[in-house]
Amino acid sequence: MDQFTLNLLVVGATFALYIGIAIWARAGSTSEFYAAGRGVHPVTNGMATAADWMSAASFISMAGLIAFGGYATSSYLMGWTGGYVLLALLLAPYLRKFGKFTVPEFIGDRFYSPTARMVAVICLIVASLTYVIGQMTGVGVAFSRFLEVENSTGLFIGAAVVFFYAVLGGMKGVTYTQVAQYCVLITAYTIPAVFISLQLTGNPLPPLGLFGDHLPSGQPLLETLDQVVTDLGFAEYTAQDGSPSSVINMVLFTFSLMIGTAGLPHVIIRFFTVPKVADARWSAGWALVFIALLYLTAPAVGAMARLNLITTIYPGGVAEESIDYEARPDWVKNWELTGLLSFEDKNGDGKIQWYNDSSESFAATAEANGWAGSELTVNRDILVLANPEIAQLPGWVIAIVAAGGLAAALSTAAGLLLAISSAVSHDVIKGTINPNISEKGELLSARVSMAVAIGVATWLGLNPPGFAAQTVALAFGLAAASIFPALMMGIFSKRVNNTGAVAGMLAGLLFTLVYIFLHKGWFFIPGTNMFEDSISGSLLGIQSTAIGSIGALINFGVAIMVSRSTDEPPQEIQDLVESIRVPRGAGSAQAH
């Protein structure tokens, strides 16, 4: 059986499974659509949360970032996992105890203000739409290669599948579909990692293989990788850029990812689906276990993929000649068809040269070799998907990886779109426009909102502002600057009032949005030089992906100052805050 047919069968089987689950778990009420009837088992919810959490950025793009960025990109691992711990400890149990359906509903009730609720809806939609662009980018990448269709066609197919199971099933359908998607994606991620770790190190456990010996060279794998990348003018893989701007950005970016993670609405609402507060804690624990299976493997996948990619181009070692373009492997030809990998013969010798042509220290070596510039362009989003082909693994492994990449993107996209549609139908339509809407009418509006959100996300996915993980990082910054501070102050401060909360959210969101747009060059202000993502066009050298931490500090600061200069919240609101934090039966506090 040829590879295309095998891919089609495996991906088609997983899609049929998702659609079958959606039909079985069809939501028949608003409670089932928004919170799966609050009857999901903690282990099931932990697995669904892990799938919701491990997006296309985690599955497709994170290992690619690690492969090309080395130690410097460990911020993604630290920020995303650390942020989940913050979410599990500081937010999830308290929000579940409050007993509402959506994040804006909590903010509206806690800050006793319809305005606060609407501002929270705006923050949620901005962050979630930015995040879902990254998922749609991942869907397009996977489809364009493995089903041999145009990127845009892949987006439309993925959107249609999400439309079916998310619109039909709501949170109930999405939850059980995400359990299946987790099983698919973790299988797809670990099987090739085990094979490649065995090939390169003889160790079947990739995290241990990363620190083992490289079998062909007989020296530690990371030492071998450091040698081959520096021989091509790239920065040492395991080295940290010690410049002040780099250290500042790494700290701020990690912090931004952490608090952005804790403020992501599509993950928070997963904890509304369990029966009890204690189940929310158990769900968080199980989700950490399921997430760890992938996150402990990702660094090994990135390092080994980078080494395999280089040895493909320089099979005799980097000191020898690179391969002839006409003799390039089939996997290179396959990915060239997608436009995500390209070759330009700059010196006309018919060979593929891949090196750091911006390295001043390597310029003399390149000139001596007759090289006129690096000739290979590799989109980092392809690395995990191409990894089995690079390592020449069996066709069934390649097909499973295709299904896994799509599962990761679709599971998170569904969660994000559900968060958006719930906010629109429950917080805008029922909470503001038509409070007397019937349950049937609210359920219909939720499904229509979901359909519109899918359409908008697909349109935005056709022209993403960056590769998957970079776009997702911007979404984390927006969530960090707007939603997380409001939730933290809502739970742990009785003094912050509605005026302060609204002012803080708007200040954090607007500052972060404006900075990102200026820094990325997405609009022009006469007399400025902020056209691109570079140190010269930034505040104190802070990159756009790290600015969310500053936006969060502004949010906290503005909210506290405004609250201190205005009236205290009503006593019943202060009692409400106290009751959220105190366990049931302790003193006079009661759970809500």
Image (spheres, rainbow, N blue to C red):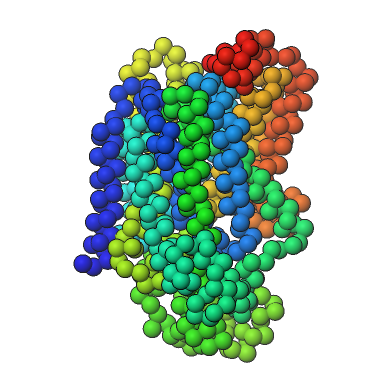
Location of the N terminus (image quadrant): bottom left
Q: Position of residue 461 (x, y in %)?
A: 44, 49
Residue beneath the point at 65% across and 49% down: 253
Q: Position of residue 45 (x, y in %)?
A: 42, 35
Q: Is residue 91 left or right of residue 437?
A: right
Compared to 409, does 319 lie above or below? below
Q: Position of residue 425 (x, y in %)?
A: 43, 24
Name which quarter of the figure residue 509 lies in. top right
Which one is nearer the viewer's eye here, 347 or 64?
Answer: 64
Residue beneath the point at 52% across and 55% down: 296
Compared to 243, does 424 lie above or below? above
Q: Is residue 317 left or right of residue 247?
A: left
Name which quarter of the figure residue 150 lies in. bottom left
Which one is nearer the viewer's eye here, 137 or 176?
Answer: 176
Q: Is residue 58 visible?
A: no
Which one is nearer the viewer's eye here, 509 or 12?
Answer: 12
Q: Position of residue 367 (x, y in %)?
A: 63, 87
Q: Is residue 69 left or right of residue 13?
A: right
Residue beneath the point at 43% across and 72% down: 199
Residue beneath the point at 34% across and 40% down: 177
